Amino acid sequence: METPSEIIITINIDSGETIEAGINIRPFCQDLLKEISKYFEIIIFTASHESYASKVIEYLDPDNLYVDH
């Protein structure tokens, strides 16, 4: 049984292909980013593809207020 996704994001892969990816955001994630950005520079590292990670970060911080890099 597949777990339903909270949000569907459209990702353009480098090969030109477009995919729909489902993501689930942990409760209070955006509140946490807002609070810790007052005290720390936020840098996100991932083993995922940049196109996927960028879309997730764009969803979490649409106004580029919290994530620095």
Image (cartoon, rainbow, N blue to C red):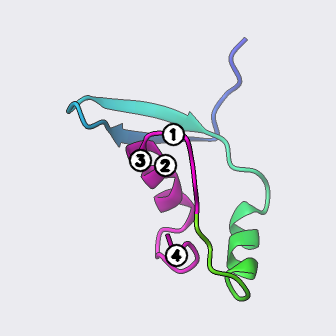
Q: Is residue 10 left or right of residue 1?
A: left
Magenta-colored stretch includes residue 66: yes
**Amino acid identity at mark 3:** Glu
Q: Answer left or right for 22 relative to 14.
A: right
Q: Secondary structure at mark 2?
A: helix
Give coordinates of residue 18: x percent, y percent.
Answer: 29, 32
**Foreground pick, 30 / 40:** 40
Q: Are marks 1 and 4 in contact (CB under 8 Å)?
A: no
Percent position of residue 13, x then y? 30, 36
Give the CA separation, mark 2 to mark 4: 14 Å
Q: Nearest to the eye among marks 2 and 1: give it.
A: 1
Which residue is disc 1 drawn over? 48
Q: Which residue is mark 4?
A: 68
* Residue receiving disc 2: 53
Marks 1 and 4 sit apart, C-alpha to C-alpha, by 18 Å
**Mark 4 surroundings: few (<14), some (14-19) or many (≥20) residues within 10 A:** few
Q: Are marks 2 and 1 in contact (CB under 8 Å)?
A: yes
Tag 3 near tag 1, CB within 8 Å: yes
Question: Which range is magenta?
Answer: 44-69
Q: Which residue is mark 3?
A: 50
The alpha-carbon separation of the residues under discs 2 and 1 comes to: 6 Å
Outermost bottom residue: 38
Q: Amino acid at mark 4?
A: Asp
- Mark 3 vs 4, N-terminal side: 3
Which residue is at a point 52% across and 75% down the rendered structure image?
68
Q: Which three-letter amino acid code belongs to the residue tagged 1? A: Ser
- Residue 26, given in percent of the width and then of the height, sits at 76, 51
In the rendered view, would you say 42 is above or below 54?
below
Nearest the viewer among 7 and 33 is 33
